[in-house]
Amino acid sequence: MAVCLSRCLRNGERAFHGVASPLPMVAILLAKRTHAPRLVYLNTGGSVDPQPDHLPASTSDPALFERTPALFDLIDLFDLAARGGLDVVFHSGIQIDRRGRINLSVLGDDYRHPKIRLPGGAGSAHLMPTAKRVILWRTRHDRQTFVESVSFVTAQGNVDQVVTPLCVFKGVGGQLELESIHQGVTFAEVQEATGWPVKEAPETPSPTSEELRALDDVDPERVRDVEFGR
Amino acid sequence: MPFAGMAGSDLPRASGFATIRDPYSGSEVVVIPPIRPDVCLIHVQEADEEGNLRILGSPYEDVLLAKASARIIATAERIVPRERFVAQPELTALPGFLVDTVVEAARGAWPTSCAGHYDYDKEFLSEYATAAKTEEGFRQFVVNSLSLGERARVRVPTARP
């Protein structure tokens, strides 16, 4: 997943991740080390292109300020997005639907009295419609998560790719279409875990040995595993 | 953009600014169209090769003007190593990724001032103010003061309608 997410990024783009985002953090650092050395790395803490000695599990940790030449806080970041200057933002959702809309707010019909109150959307309602491209990721891929229609739209807009442990979706004309299926996963498994009908897709290209070596350099302590409950 | 203040002033009407009713308080609020310059030219005391900029002294509104602009071209009294920015990132006024071009230009703010380096050149500005009273005077002044030589063509911009 880390390699898939890093491949979503292009050289020279300005990419941002928020809190609780170890995989995007690793993906951005990996992309900078491989195909996108001029990628601009922005984050919730407010640093620019930090070079941390040890990756933190918290993605707003002071470690992400190591060797930053400037500060760029969330006020700056939201302004940047509002004036069309943010290329990529990473988001996720408790629910993600066929149209790439995310729900981080409530489950149940009544916003004031929900069945379950979710953590909240943070800046997603502002950033998804204003960033040029949105990359979603979720380590859990099942029918509770990938639904036909979210029960509450916390945020929507500009979804380009969605990376899960099973596959990659591509945003095409406002709909998520299957782009590729990871090695060792069957089409039937993806369909079974997805709440809308999907079409066959080729296999995700395996990580190259160069990518895996770079990944090990970037995240030798496997901080990314925290997203998989390990 | 809604804009606090201006109540009772003739300026909004003279400038063509609209007002809208604030749906929360019910009061009239002036709204102004955003200004998005194509290019911002900014002079700073220190820059590095990535375009990180430091303003040592009052930043005035330079940072806001720069961020509003589509492109930023900076001149700097001196280019310093990136490590200087890394040591104190909180002093960086503009991060390099926003800056398109950096030019090392000592005394680049002349004939205006640069805090900590030089004051404005009063004599030069007075000469300019006198010369610029006529179009020919302005032309001659630009040719002479910028050492352009007599063959240089100086176009005097016409006032906008």
Image (tube, grey):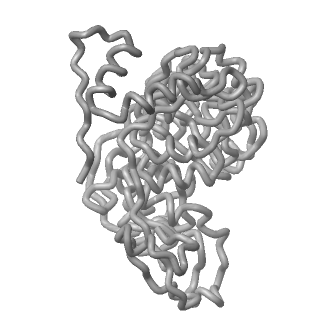
Above or below: residue A226 compared with residue A218: below
Say left or right for A76 vs A153.
right
User: Foreground residue, B91 or A139?
Assistant: B91
Q: Position of residue B96 (x, y in %)?
A: 55, 29
Q: How many marks?
A: 0
- In the rendered image, the vertical position of residue B68 relative to residue A92, given as above or below: above
Q: Residue at x 25, y 32 (%)?
A: B156
Q: Position of residue A217 (x, y in %)?
A: 64, 21
User: Which residue corresponds to the image point at 59% horizontal and 86% vertical from the top-left?
Assistant: A111
Is B112 above or below relative to A118?
A: above
Residue at (66%, 80%) from the top-left corner?
A116
Quarter of the image with the C terminus of chain A is top right
Q: Which residue is located at x 56 percent, y 36 percent?
A: A41
- Comparing A27 with B15, the one in front is B15
Q: Position of residue A196 (x, y in %)?
A: 35, 68
> Would residue B143 be found to the left or right of residue A90 on screen?
left
Q: Can residue A164 be seen? A: no
The one nearer the camera, A72 or A207, is A72
Position of A45 with respect to A100 (left or right) is: right
Q: Is residue A78 above or below residue A1?
A: below
Give the x, y percent position of residue B93.
64, 36
Specify whether residue A126 is in view: yes
Q: Quadrant of residue A197?
A: bottom left
